[in-house]
Image: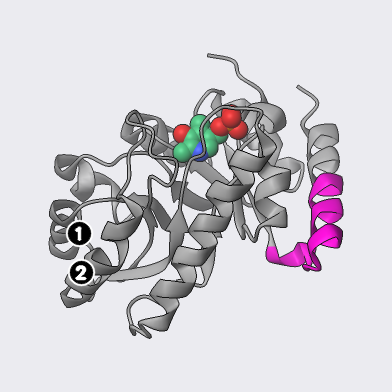
Amino acid sequence: MRIQENLEHIRRNIKDACKMSGRNPDDVTIIAVTKYVSVDTARKAISAGIKHLGENRDEGFLHKKNEISEDAIWHFIGTLQSRKVKDIINEIDYLHALDRISLAKEIQKRATGITKCFVQVNVSGEVSKHGLQPEEVVPFIQKISQYDRIQVVGLMTMAPHIDNENRLRQIFRDLKQLQKEVQALRHIHAPCTELSMGMSNDYSIAVEEGASYIRIGTSLVGKEM
Ligand SMILES: *Cc1c(COP(=O)(O)O)cnc(C)c1O
């Protein structure tokens, strides 16, 4: 994998998407999703200039974090089982998949500081996707306001693997709209300034629609396993 070239290509696309939408490319952070690659490849991504790494399984995450001594910002992007919270929560910088009260409760119990979380939303309505239904998001955020170890920094969604640009765009717009509703709550623990959306096949559209974190695996670091 030519990570450096891939990264340059992605950065160019981000720049173009920002130009289209009047955004500043500095407001878009690339998370290299390393779940399908080795520690070595993850290190190469860091050498190429990546600062943010994303993993979706507890074993994979702990292994990478143990082996990688370079400074990195760690994003846990997968569904987190409640019983794994204690092993993970104080090791990560961001959790992208807060999707239920029981998880919030466990984080409150186990976190030693404030955990930056994205609330995951199932905007597309696909049954296979995790996350809250859009109409559940505001009540959810109100409910977790009692847990002061959780800061809702933003919303996250996964779009389906489709080529229908209009459909993808609508999903990202819906998440942006939901973000505005959460911000209007003016909840001190839910500034919700960020949007985690966009993967290898749809990040350009996501950036046009306001993504501040894009999670890129395959088209940046490839797939080795
Ligand atoms: C795997 C994964 C990604 C990256 O997917 P690619 O299509 O390889 O870029 C992004 N977000 C989540 C939540 C993932 O599980």
Residue name at image x 16 percent, y 76 percent:
146
Mark 2, Cα crowd under 10 Å, few <14 / some 14-19 / many 20+, is many
Tell me the CA gap for discs 1 and 2. 7 Å
The part of the image, by quadrant, that contains residue 48 is: top right
Q: Which residue is mark 1?
A: 104
Kind of element beneath mark 1: helix
Q: Check residue 140 for magenta coloring.
A: no
Amino acid type at image mark 1:
Ala
Mark 1, Cα crowd under 10 Å, few <14 / some 14-19 / many 20+, is many
Labels 1 & 2 near each other (Cβ < 8 A): yes
The part of the image, by quadrant, that contains residue 224 is: top right
Q: Which mark is residue 118?
A: none
Kind of element beneath mark 2: helix
Left or right of residue 2: residue 159: left
Left or right of residue 35: residue 27: right
Residue name at image x 85 percent, y 33 percent:
5
Residue 62 in the image: state x and y as whole percent: 37, 37
**Mark toward the start of the polypeptide (1 vs 2):** 1
Amino acid type at image mark 2:
Ile
Specify the segment rendered in magenta.
11-27
Name the outermost residue toward the top: 225
Residue 16 in the image: state x and y as whole percent: 86, 52
Location of residue 221 with respect to 203 vertically, above or below = above
Q: Which residue is mark 2?
A: 144
Instruction: Specify whether residue 38 is in view.
Output: yes
Location of residue 124 with respect to 40 vertically, above or below = below
Q: Check residue 19 for magenta coloring.
A: yes
